[in-house]
Amino acid sequence: MGRDGAAELTPLFRFSTPAGLLEIRAVAVRTVAIKGVRSSRYLCMDEAGRLYGQLRYSTEDCSFEEEIRPDGYNVYKSKKYGISVSLSSAKQRQQFKGKDFLPLSHFLPMINTVPVESTDFGEYGDYSQAFEPEVYSSPLETDSMDPFGITSKLLPVKSPSFQK
Amino acid sequence: MFLYDAFPKEFLWGVGTGAFQVEGSWRKDGKGSSIWDHFIHSELRDADSTDASSDSYTLLDKDLSALDFLGVTFYQFSISWSRLFPAGVVAAPSEKGLQYYNTLIDSLLYRNIDPVVTLYHWDLPLMLQEKYGGWKNESVIDIFNDYATFCFQTFGERVKYWITIHNPYLVAWHGYGTGIHAPGERGKMTTVYSVGHNLIKAHAKVWHNYRKHFQPYQKGMLSIVLGSHWIEPNKSEDALDISKCQQSMERVLGWFAKPIHGDGDYPEELKNEFSFLPRFTEDEKNYIKGTADFFAFSFGPNNFKPPNTLPKMGQNLSLNLREVLNWIKLEYNSPRILIAENGWFTDSHVKTDDTTAIYMMKNFINKVLQAIKYDNIDVFGYTAWSLLDGFEWQHAYNIRRGLFYVDFKSEKKERIPKSSALYYKQIIGENGFFPRESTPSLQAQFSCDFSWGITESVLKAESMASSPQFCDSSLYLWNVTGDGLLHKVKGVKLKTRPAQCTDFVSIKKQLDLLEKMKVTHYRFALDWSLILPNGDLSVVNRQVLRYYRCMISEALKLNVQSMVTLYYPTHAYLGLPGPLLQAGGWLNRSTAYAFQDYAALCFQEFGDLVKLWITINEPNRLGDIYNRSSNDTYWAAHNLLIAHAMAWKIYDEQYRSFQYGKVSLSLHSDWAEPANPYFESHSKAANRFLQFEIGWFADPIFKTGDYPATMRDYINFKNRKGVLYSSLPSFTSEEKELVKGAADFYALNHFTTRFVIHEPQNGSQYEFDRDIQFLQDITCLSSPSRLAVVPWGVRKVLRWIKKNYGDIDIYITANGIDDQSLDNDELRNYYLGKYVQEVLKGEYMIDPSSPE
């Protein structure tokens, strides 16, 4: 996902580079938010099934239903539009119309091994604002006693001089 | 950014409850049924337990002690209408019920606690529901007004703050729309809005009644508690998104607030959307307009649940209390505001260790402070919700909202303060937020021999001198044909001069920067795999050695001393010579022997110029690479310790006598703070974290020659429990002797402070062994990579090192923060200023350490 919010049609292997690293986080039962780590953007879908990245999480457009296929791969379907996330081009989609699954729509989530670099926040200017959106733009879990998710993850201890 | 400041002197601190949530005794002393009594016995499965609840009706003294404990200035409670008038209609009041509220009010006043009294917190007398259909029927308005009159007459001399109705939105919406609240009607939208209409009229009538007949001599104030969510646009600049947010707020808060606090009528948005919306006549508008002496606002989970019943309009829910206060200020002409309900909840299994609640409270109350200080919003009081665990409406007893824990099944139902009670008590005591960890800033100088440096990771060596003009023997002509190119003159050979260090372009660049910084020390790392590609001494890359020597000697000409790191692994680049990596890397003891040879070579080559050596940078992070199991991690660490100690020993025995340098290793030493300062398990967890992180390497070297007892004991304890199958290696007596004392100073890389929670974990990786979970304090300034900026943490870690390892020289070998701004790196500027200040304080208060 690029900074301009355009979700590129990236060959799958690119997802093992920092630029293509996606963070998948559960927001409800069987529902996930997918976030580009480098671009800090949530993956969202419009009604035509086109993917785009957005800084702010929107429950409707950026929630995906996770389905684990018998082959161990996952398929992600937009909650709102029911279209699955696919990295195929418009032409490929056309060819596969009516088939069960679009090409390049199967994913294999893994524990991250790619060193995650911090994201650029210079473009948002004023830093007194810049450190807050992270908290307020994450999906707010109003049904949880920890709506900001301040305790939800077991993060490894990181050192900036080791995780370069 | 978090605001450390005090609230205005007159600020009111309170806590609240609703009668039905805490009183219990629903049939005692002739109490009449309310719609909620009926509702839970017919609709909610948890009905049995609701009969008991926290029993405030019989345990008043315990409630009063709890209020005393907090030190609040007011208590917001509600009167159970059917406890006073079992049938709802005003007649002879129930003596026992009357006595209860009289005693409650008198006891509060005796304690200097102001009563803030709510007349209606959702428990309508059942008779009024059955006879009239409840709030659907306009005749309930007059009956409510009679009940209010009685309360003013009876309690009004003693009560200065009155609330007519608590959160009418929820009454209308969930009582008559979704049906999740009593009376549980799943009605039409028309019903919902006519109920709202009647609630507004009822409130207005009671306000006029009080205004006319009681206020002149009782001198109190009266309002209605309005609740709301907050919502923010998907795209902050998008006009359509912004207008949708506005609509969302108008549908919930505006529905009641605009008639009462605004112009007497419903928001246009609402009128346009719903043709069936009841209309106010002009007279009614004038009658309703301005019927509140202050704005009483409720912001809590009830207005966020269930999410699918909220008008989200495709936008994002938010818990930013400061923003919604700003909206109220702008919409309703800067009213005085009482936060009449605020807080979050915990799951029912959470007892007194409600750590998340502390951070929710910290965030909410600080937002209120910011609204007062930055936005000039006139908030005059705050009600934490709630005093006690109790009945939580549609959630029954599945969530808890009390500052005090109540075990509903217990005999005595003691009110036990939770962490949030202790925290709230502290905020009230300090009337705000006092930066307890920071001390006044210190204006002083570091000692003369203090070393100021800058650090670099592995310095990429140029293998060739990169200025060809000095090593190319050809002669060239330039620009003969006007093409700007060089043309070699054939057959001419010039004499080149001998190679010089300044031929390396990168060194020159580096030196320019060092000169600008005016540092006394420069820390960089050598590339082991480049110097010894085979891992042993069979091949030594002399070119690379020459480059590094040039760097060191040229820096010395600028009076900058080099601190050289021999081995600097990172997550992305392990930095081991290939053959060693293939032989198992640090899991293989032979890597330690190879390191010893490599270190000796470096001492021999550069030791005449280098007086400060770091063998290994952050060996305590290498566990992230050898993480197949904690056994792997511990063995890799063991070999790293041995490798370091052997290198130190070689230096000590063979080079120190004539090179006079010092050798140590840099440990990643971040600070850990208990996430919940009121729980011993958290302090123990913080200490355990430091032992597993720092003591793991520092204890063998600086203290005992063995791993920390805390660490061994904890791993053994988990082994015995059968949840862990790894163990720490043992040191042989030779190893012990080798390792103990094998460092000449303490070197630390410090970046942040982590807030830790004790949380039992099972898993094969070593992160799980210490049973720690982190908490991210969202009110704390942090970097883009989420490192918290906690300047006092560095002072604490320095103190801890001194306490544990005695009076040794300390070098901070890395400190800083990620800030990706291209030129104006404000965050880094702030960070360095604050952290250096804390080190200076440490210097003066602790010891003559000499950090770099």
Image (tube, coloured by chain):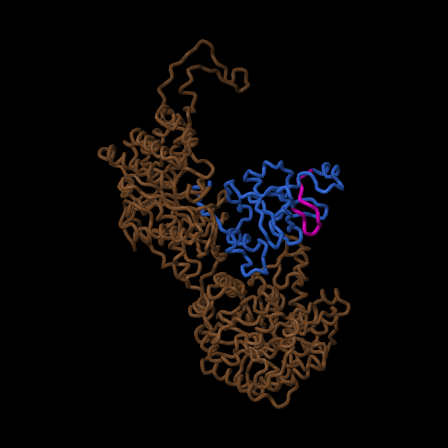
Chain B tint in image: brown
Q: Position of residue B493 (x, y in %)?
A: 41, 12
Residue B852: tell me if it is visible.
no
Chain coloured blue in the rendered structure: A
Q: In the current view of this chain or complex, which residue is farthest to the top? A: B491
Q: Position of residue B392 (x, y in %)?
A: 58, 70
Queried whether the magenta region covers residue A18, the answer comes back as no
Give left or right: position of B736 versus B378: left
Queried whether the magenta region covers residue A79, the answer comes back as yes
Q: In the current view of this chain or complex, which residue is farthest to the bottom? A: B92
Residue B19: tell me if it is visible.
yes
Q: Position of residue A162 (x, y in %)?
A: 43, 41
Q: Main secondary structure of the magenta part?
A: loop
- Relative vertical location of residue B475 with respect to residue B453 in this rendering, above or below: above
- Quadrant in the picture for residue B226: bottom right
**Image: magenta residue range:** A76-88
Give left or right: position of B9 versus A34: left
Give left or right: position of B261 versus B681: right
Q: Position of residue B42 (x, y in %)?
A: 66, 74
Q: In the current view of this chain or complex, which residue is farthest to the left? A: B657
Relative depth, front residue between B820 and A96: A96
Q: In the current view of this chain or complex, which residue is farthest to the right? A: B275
- Relative vertical location of residue B425 with respect to residue A64 in this rendering, above or below: below
Quadrant assignment for the C terminus of chain B: top left
